[in-house]
Image (cartoon, grey):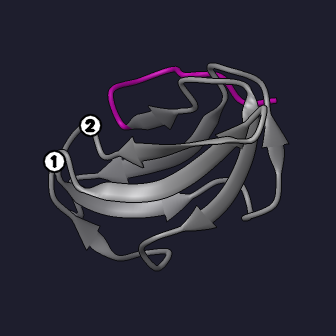
Amino acid sequence: VARAADSNALVAPIAGTVLVWKVENGATVSARESVAVMEAMKMESAIDAHRGGKLLQKVAAGTYVPAGTVIAEITSGD
């Protein structure tokens, strides 16, 4: 399981299931934009981009991940 290693990493703040990606893989996102929804114990939580850039998904929707798992990377797009 991947863990946060650099500032590009978007990590799961909670243990749970990535229900849905709200943006396409490879899309350009803005800081604080809602990019995914996770579910834990029947409660949904929006996951926001921590920075702007190109979002590269690392896990598929429907995947259960532990807290701290890298679910995507947001690169500068260079």
Please say whether residue 32 is one of the residues in the magenta stretch. Answer: no
Q: Nearer the viewer, residue 64 or 57?
A: 64
Q: Which mark is residue 50?
A: 2
Q: Quadrant of residue 28?
A: bottom left
Question: Residue placed at 69% from the left, 51% from the top?
Answer: 18
Identify residue type, mark 2: His
Q: Residue 60 carries which label?
A: none
* Residue that mark 1 sits on: 31
Looking at the rendering, in which quadrant would you find the N terminus? top right
Residue 33 image position (x, y, % from top left)? 23, 55
Mark 1 in CB contact with mark 2 (< 8 angstroms): yes
Looking at the rendering, in which quadrant would you find the C terminus? bottom left
Residue 56 image position (x, y, % from top left)? 48, 61
- How far apart are the two marked residues, 1 and 2, measured between alpha carbons? 5 Å
Question: Residue placed at 51% from the left, 20% from the top?
Answer: 5
Decide if residue 11 is on the left or right side of residue 18.
left
Task: Find the magenta span and give its range.
Answer: 1-8
- Main SS of the magenta part reads loop
Figure check: 18 above or below 6: below
Figure check: 10 above or below 28: above
Q: Does dot 2 land on a helix, a strand or a loop?
A: loop
Identify residue type, mark 1: Ala
Figure check: 5 above or below 37: above
Q: Which of 11 and 2 is in front in this view?
A: 11
Residue 44 image position (x, y, % from top left)? 59, 45
* Disc with the residue nearer the chain's start (1 vs 2): 1
Residue 42 image position (x, y, % from top left)? 75, 41
Q: In which quarter of the image is residue 30?
A: bottom left
Decide if residue 74 is on the left or right side of residue 66.
left
